[in-house]
Image (spheres, helix red, strand yellow):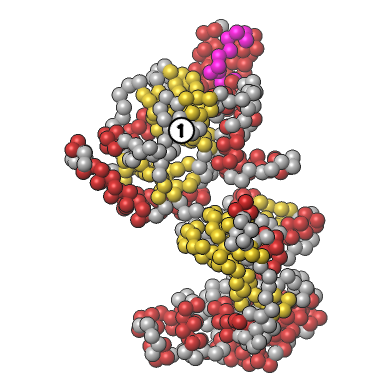
Amino acid sequence: MKERYEKLIRAIEHHQYLYHTLDQPEITDEAYDSLMRELLEIEARHPEFISPLSPSQRVGGVPLSEFKKVHHQVRQWSFDDVFDFNELIKWEEKIKRLMLKEPSLKSERLEYCCELKIDGLKVVLTYINGEFVEGATRGDGQVGENVTENLKTIKSIPFFLQEKVDIIVVGEAWMNKSELARINKEREKNGEQIFANTRNAGAGSIRQLDPKVTAKRRLDTFIYDIDALGWEWPKTQGEELELLKKLGFKTNPYFHIAKDLAEVQKYYLEWTKKKDKMDYGLDGIVIKINSRKIQEVLGYTGKTPRWGVAYKFPAEQVTTVVEAIVLQVGRTGVLTPVAHLTPVRVAGSLVSRATLHNEDEIKRLDVRVGDTVILQKAGDVIPDIVAVLKEFRTGKEVAYEFPATVADCGGDGRIERVPGQVAWRCVSKDSFAQKRRIFYHFVSKKAFDMDGCGPKIIDVLLDNNLIADFADIFTLKKGDLLALPRFAEKSVDNLLASIEKSRPVSLSKFLVSLSISQVGEETAIDLAKHFGSIEKLRVASFEDLQQLDGVGPVVAEALTLWFGNKNNKRILDDLFAQVKISRKFLDEDKGKNGKLAGKTFVITGTLSALSRDQAKDKIRALGGETSESISAKTSYLIAGENAGSKLEKAQALGVAILKEGDFLDLLK
């Protein structure tokens, strides 16, 4: 019986390795379950047989009162960070200088092993004669915590290696994103605080005193380094990874041997784009000199290996200081408070400003001039201040109050609160700053989409009195533009071709381009669908307009006032002579039979994986509709980070709420 029991342990361990590490199962789940049942039956009859390395022990042992300290046999190091290619070049230059001083390295060729930097918790695993005996956290590098029982619950950590070898290995324990979503959903339901990210969840799971809690969280590992080995060492880092895999450890398959930094950079840029598509968190790549001989000669500084470096992906959250808060005049005269920041690099670009949206947002954040804040940017989204770090306050910070006048508002500069809203606006409607914003919007992607005719071009055209109204853009001649500074013939030809290409425009985009107060992309689509032509819309009464779903009295009044204005009537007539407005609000066949047909979506808060416009495009491509307002007719509310009042209204109306992960799953 004992012999049968030991064979069952080995067999089950082997099939767990095939399933969880190689993803190549040889037997069915039912057959595996049958072996496991037999093992458990033997253990129930013969508890004296139970081995600490039995597969049954992966479900979690007895809760601990505290973690014991572990003194690492080999000190645990951490890599220095670099954040751009220039810093990486400087690192290599330093390496080459060090190698020149070492006679034994003068003939050695540099090549690099590039590995993905998994955003998890570093773990150190010790095996004696091929059997798992201890697992520990990194701790301070010299002393960690014994988390052996918790690590036993991770099925990709082998209890027995393919060879009977003494070895200490290092790797990353991590939680996948889908598991995080499952756990957070459960915690939210139970009124518990949700985990911020996979790293926090993974680290919290490893450091549970009750291994049964860890077992429920389905963690995984990638092993990437050998610290101590009872036989001949591999000659390269690439060979080391292959040996780890051969011994039975789960390794990340996406490592790459690069012959130079140009190849390293190519790998880095490739994974910068692909990182969010992986089911585990990545915060950069790790670059190691591939030759073990060079590694050994270069050695370590007091804190880090000289032979390796972490090349971090652009941060999406950073801290900075609010140096000032200023009001920016928008195209409808509404004033947007903008924080001027100490410049900081976030999501790959240098940022010195962030929108504060409105007065309520300033009060909600309690943000003051001089505050240290957390800044967030996801993809191409405008940076947002998401939190104030109040523990950094000195008492010298200054609370912001809206002024009586703003110089850019024109006239006497007075401002006023917009009735029924939290926004402020210029009293005068003829400021030059507002005019610029209106033109910027007219040529933007959401409106006429004049590629190559951005704000800088508009500024030049306005400053040289070449345009005063929208229609003037379409009457520009080559001679007009060539006379301007820094306008070459090719760039002029490209600009004129872009303007010409934009003349055909859908009705919804045409409405968006006019900067009518209260009329955004969703309302424009609703209007275009209902009226079908600009001729019908411009003569619609207030009563007709307010009855339209998604419009209401505020929007109806804004439309009536705009179309009734004498100057706006002239602007429309001039535009009609230059552009061709399609009667279709969108391609009528696009997504008609898609999986989201008949569903209406509202988005609130910040999405991390894509912008709001991208989300809306994907919904429409699958036949769904989008709206800016919540009603009983709304099918789903997509709730991103910092969701606002729309979330509360959706909950009150019983509208189905999708987290971003749920929404992305729906799109698949």
Residue at x 42% of width, y 24% of height: 73
Residue at x 50% of width, y 77% of height: 455
Q: Amino acid at mark 1?
A: Gly
What are the residue bounds of the magenta stretch?
46-56
Q: Left or right? Give the position of 317 relative to 654.
A: left
Query: Taking 263 as reference, is 77 above or below it?
Result: above
Residue 54 is inside the magenta segment: yes
Residue 81's x, y, as percent? 41, 47
Query: Taking 275 as reference, is 572 above or below it?
Result: below
Residue 665's x, y, as percent? 61, 50
Question: Where does label 1 land, which residue?
Answer: 141
Splitting the image into 4 quarters, where does residue 582 fall? Answer: bottom right
Residue 387's x, y, as percent? 63, 55
Residue 313 is inside the magenta segment: no
Instruction: Say whether residue 382 is visible.
Output: no
Q: Left or right? Give the position of 263 relative to 383.
A: left
Residue 478's x, y, as percent? 40, 89
Q: Nearer the viewer, residue 144 or 172?
A: 144
Quadrant the N terminus occupies: top right
Q: Nearer the viewer, residue 30 or 354?
A: 354
Instruction: Say whether residue 67 is visible.
Output: yes
Residue at x 50% of width, y 53% of height: 315
Query: Taking 172 as reference, is 45 above or below it?
Result: above
Splitting the image into 4 quarters, where does residue 180 fall? Answer: top right
- Mark 1: few/some/many CA within 10 Å (<14, 14-19, 20+): some
Residue at x 79% of width, y 61% of height: 632
Splitting the image into 4 quarters, where does residue 506 fall? Answer: bottom right
Q: Secondary structure at mark 1?
A: loop
Q: Left or right? Give the position of 191 relative to 303.
A: right
